[in-house]
Image (cartoon, rainbow, N blue to C red):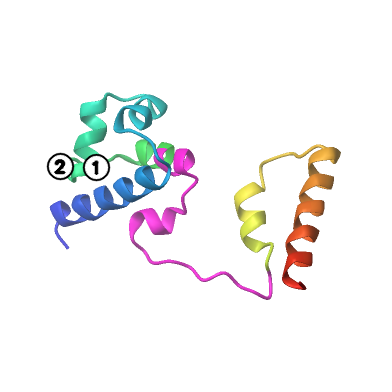
Amino acid sequence: MKDTEVYKEFGRKLFRMRSAANLTQQQVADALGIGKSTYTQYENGDRGVNLSMLKKIREFFQADMNELLGIGEREIDRSRPFAKWEETFSSVEFTEDEVSKLIDYAMFLVSQREK
């Protein structure tokens, strides 16, 4: 695959993520610390991103790096439902109250299945 095709595919992914988040190009550009024209070039596939910008984009959209890079979507291992959680939140320290709320919410989700 040529670089231009890679840029175009990455741009389409950016567009989908931005649209799903109901954000403008300017809002995303501001969050990434770049100009709107630079972001527009990324989204249009006219310009590639460096590793540092790729990391910022991943963090901003809370996206999976494999998905961003087009490596393919990983299936969630249903036998280990918290593996994705551990991967995503391993560096986050939750308060006891937040942990309690997360457990309550998980229990709520399970209870809704049983209805």
Amino acid on which the number 1 mark rests in the picture = Glu
Quadrant in the picture for residue 47 = top left
Q: Secondary structure at mark 2?
A: loop
Crowding at dot 1, Cα within 10 Å, few <14 / some 14-19 / many 20+, comes out as many
Is 38 part of what is drawn in magenta?
no
Towards the viewer: 109 or 53: 109
Per the rendered image, the range of residues in magenta is: 57-80
Residue at x 30% of width, y 46% of height: 15
Q: Is residue 23 above or below residue 82?
A: above
Where residue 85 appears, as percent x and y from the top left, is 65, 56
Quarter in which the N terminus is drawn? bottom left
Disc marking residue 43: 1
Quarter in which the C terminus is drawn? bottom right
Residue at x 51% of width, y 71% of height: 75
Q: Is residue 78 above or below residue 25?
A: below
Q: Is residue 33 above or below residue 112?
A: above
